[in-house]
Amino acid sequence: MKKVHFSEWGIESPKYWGLLALLGVVIAISGGAAWYMEHNGHWVTGMTNQIVWGTPHVFAIFLIVAASGALNVASIGTAFDKRLYKPLGRLSGLLAITLLVGGLAVLVLDLGRADRLLVAMTHYNFKSIFAWNIFLYTGFMAIVAIYLWFMMDRRMNKYYKPAGIGAFLWRIILTTGTGSIFGFIVARQGYDAAILAPMFVIMSFAYGLAIYILVLLYAAKLDGREVGDKVLFRLKNLLGVFAASVFYFTLVYHLTNLYGTENHEYERFILLDGGVYTALFWIGWVFVGNLLPIALVYHPSIGKTRGGIIAAATAVVLGGLATIYVVVIGGQAFPMAIFPGKTVLSSGFFDGVNGQPFLYSPSLPEVLLGIGGLALTLLLTFIGIRVLQFLPVTLSDEAMDPHHVKS
């Protein structure tokens, strides 16, 4: 491999400022939606005393999970010493930070009392996985920032590999913690499963890599930088492996639930009778998020085209949002069986009502808040690559493969 040089994003100023202005407008609208929900109360949303984690949480968790996965590209180059991935590490680390910031921004603004965040940051209940995550998230940003510093500063290169290994281990712990939020909730049949922790880890690999591919190709195209087939095909094959792995964990998760009689009603709800949740599971989670990208990536002709690879990465992102929606909201929509086999109608909070699922319809402010998190991620990413040298000047086959022969 030839020596790879880096430079700032050099697109024309009018186009750059126009892009930032567009993202800024989306963020402003999202902020207005957050203010509207905070000022009027959460009764203006689709959330209830049963569906307490709504659409903003779907976007927030997706972005947080993808943040961990976006760092995977850098980790492969550092922790596993794969030279082809090393020039991709800077953008990988930047995306890991910006995705996490975007996700946490949505999460904080969806709490209802964002001003009380300081209480959550100074008073801890270490029996709660949420308390652990405060340290995991802030620690992740700090470790990745140090990792990027050591990666970009020649004087600190001797600490580059240990920092990369530390970042790799931390991100595995972080995503395990995020999956454990659901795995530790024993009261809900859709959550109470230890396999959710590793399943979230492998989902992070897929979602983060898909976003990385889309951002890399977009940034390179606007700036006239070349991304050769050697790099792109390696990334798209890896995406296919991760999509197939998510599908495998999906099969294991639901087959395990079907083995236990106590989970049959929940599985029937998700797989057959859940209405929008069933549709999102089969169409969004399984087909769009798993089977379609696998087919596109490994198709003998489509898988070798830029359009096919972009379509596969986009499918993984859309399927990922559907997956998180089914896990987060579908798990709440199915009522808790406090008294299995019995129907309890005396409680005003519907505790233990078996059978009829709780209804939830996302409101416009919830959706706008979630989209604002995506916009914030892109805004911070585009500012980062504009002011600092995160992008390789070229990723052509000639630069990345010393044995490449021009056809």
Image (tube, rainbow, N blue to C red):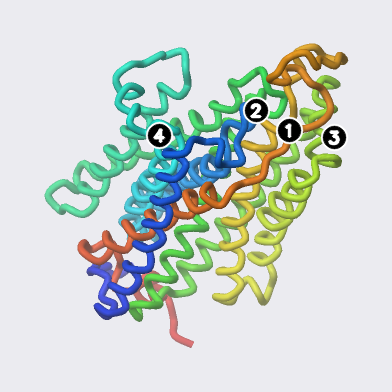
Dot 4 or dot 3, earlier in sequence: 4
Q: Nearer the viewer, mark 2 or mark 3?
A: 2
SS for tag 1?
Answer: loop
Q: Secondary structure at mark 4?
A: helix
CA separation, marks 4 and 3? 37 Å
Which numbered marker is on residue 99?
Answer: none
Residue at numbered disc 3: 268
Whether residue 214 is situated above or below residue 80 in the rendered picture: below
Using the numbered discs, state the Cα–Cα distance from disc 4 to disc 1 in whole angstroms. Answer: 39 Å
- In three-dimensional space, the C-alpha distance between marks 2 and 3, rounded to whole angstroms, equals 20 Å
Q: Residue at x 33, y 31 (%)?
A: 115
Q: Earlier in the sequence, mark 4 or mark 2?
A: 2
Q: Which residue position holds label 1?
A: 358
Q: Which disc number belongs to residue 169?
A: 4
Looking at marks 2 and 3 on the same chain, the residue that comes earlier in the sequence is marked by: 2
* Residue 382: x %, y % from top left: 32, 63
Q: Mark 1 or mark 4, which is nearer the start of the sequence? A: 4
Disc number lying in front (4 or 3): 3
Give the side of residue 162 with respect to residue 247, left or right.
left
| Tag 1 and tag 2, C-beta contact below 8 Å | yes
Structural distance between the alpha carbons of marks 3 and 1? 15 Å
Q: Decide if residue 80 is in sight here.
A: no
Instruction: Please tell me which residue lies in front, 24 or 68.
Output: 24
